[in-house]
Image (spheres, coloured by chain):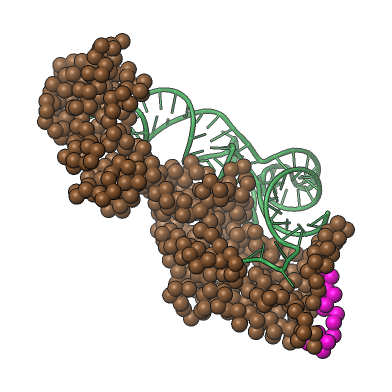
Chain colours: A brown, B green
Amino acid sequence: MSAPRVRFAPSPTGSLHLGTARTALFNWLFARSRGGSFVLRIEDTDAARSLPEHEAGVLDDLRWLGLGWDEGPDEGGPSGPYRQSERLDRHRQAAERLVMAGAAYPCFCDTARLKKERLELRAAGGASLYPGRCRRIAPAEAAARRARESHALRLNVDAVACGETAIEFNDLIHGRIRTPITQIGDFVLMRREGRPSYNFAVVLDDLEMEITHVIRGDDHLSNTPRQVLVARALGRSGPPGFAHLPLIVGEGGAPLSKREGGASVAWFREQGYTPEGLINALVLLGWSAPGGQDLLTREEILACFDLERVSGSPAIFDRQKLDALASRHMARASESRLIPLALDHLRRSGHLPDPVPEGAGAWVGRLVSLYADRLAKMADLPREAAPVFRFDPSLALADPDVRKELCEPATRRVIEALVEEIGGEPITAPRFQAAADAVRRRTGAKGRQLYHPLRVALTGAPSGPELVKLLPVIEEGVRLRLPRPVIPCVERARALLAATSGATA
RNA sequence: GUCCCCAUCGUCUAGUCUGGCCUAGGACACCGCCCUUUCAAGGCGGCAACACGGGUUCAAAUCCCGUUGGGGACGCCA
């Protein structure tokens, strides 16, 4: 079989939706895993809602996800133009050919009347279809009226279906789909104002672009028989392969809410998720690897992706699962990728000043590496690493865990011993290790009894990365001389001891 | 209303096409234990599902019919 050609056809009416991104991902995976082409087509015929900045945003989001395309509006290609609005002439001409062939006809009906009829039909207990009134106008008369009356163009379903009782097509995910012809009325191909209808434009464009596989959301499944009819009228030898992906839904099965964010790729990007993490979570919605593993890189997914393994039922998008996967990907990301992201979020949260001081980059690299495996998204870094940047005895003591350690005579002795051992020198890993050993010999405390009090006193927080790694990073931060300076560890311990000196429990 | 799609732990899913290997497997979340230089991570364990009702069969999560529930289409929206 020749190389497949697939297309992703978003409307630039907003930022890239998660569900739409998933459709793009599956198309991309299908093309890339089979040596095919991934075509990007912008469906912008709805001029009122399609904005150039939205188009740019969608393209940007796709690039960020790493879903590059082979042909599209910016780089062109042999099947252009790739903006539907620039293909209007083709749509019009094709529609005229259908009229001449008797597969389509002009409809002069009043839309208000049509609407009323639809309601009546439905109330009477059936599908609400166009009754086919204008189909019966003689061709000569119809042609004459076209010159002076505004009109739409409809497909003559009876003529195209050739007496069949049902329209059938094969779906790669759902199998054989059969729709009774009685459910399909003569639908509109060209609107009164001269724009093509969706069901017409997609089919013609896909045909002209030689698309071999249409991979899209389940919401288009019921439209497909109509499109099969259009393709047939247009003389296509056989329909393309179809694959209708189950929809992604939100909590409780309701549509993913766009309101609170969290439904658009831009939001996840803004939050500092890695694209690998998002891709991994998205691909697991309706698809699973043959081996059952779920932590997957793009390459691993590509190596085993197959539409046959796509499920037919809708999936609820689970943020917890995303976060679990995302933090694993974060931990794998290189420091050079993490640094700019971290700087951005640290600056935004006010932990770092806006022109970031000289030398801060390397330090932030070491810092973020300590925290990466506990971060689903970089927006969590300022909170996780807050103790490094902000130290305030009264704030620290507000934590019951911290207060407890400092009010316990035994743990106070541990902390006091360490302060003596370290002295005024900056803490390095070997120096800390030596001091901790000395404290252990002096006090007899070990394990949790030893290290937890030290952590609490030296950082001001009850939890964080491994002490021996964290402490030197804090000390390095001190030397950076930030506008709001990082407080040295020993100073923290002294301040906390002083603040609680009379309060032993 | 008519037609189409869907239905396994709370969630994502494996298994369904090709019935027996399923006392239904994994992951996330949750709970417990272990380890440990705290917490986290890691290791081990636990909780937890075949929507319901009929049929076919020696045997059904798997095939068939029905019911219920969810989603979609029936637009001169996409």
| Residue A29, placed above or below residue A373 | below
Which residue is rendered at x = 46% and y = 54% of the image? A266
Q: Is residue A122 left or right of residue A414?
A: right
Q: Is residue A484 left or right of residue A318?
A: left
**Quadrant of res B41:** top left
Which residue is rendered at x = 25% and y = 24% of the image? A457
Residue A121 in view in this figure: yes
Of residues A374 and A473, the one nearer the viewer is A473
Residue A135 is inside the magenta segment: yes
Q: Is residue A440 left or right of residue A48?
A: left
Which residue is rendered at x = 51% and y = 48% of the image? A261
Of residues A193 and A203, the one nearer the viewer is A193
Q: Which residues are magenta?
A: A130-143
Toward the right, the furthest residue is A124
- Provide residue A306's location: percent of width, then percent of height: 52, 60
- Provide residue A4's location: percent of width, then percent of height: 52, 72
Disc tally is 0
Residue A374 is inside the magenta segment: no
**Quadrant of res B11:** top right
Which residue is rendered at x = 46% and y = 48% of the image? A294
Of residues A365 and B41, the one nearer the viewer is A365
Residue A67 in view in this figure: no
Q: Is residue A128 left or right of residue A262?
A: right
Q: Quarter of the image containing the C terminus of chain A?
A: top left
Report the predominant secondary structure element of the magenta stretch. helix
- Provide residue A125's location: percent of width, then percent of height: 86, 57
- Provide residue A351's location: percent of width, then percent of height: 30, 41
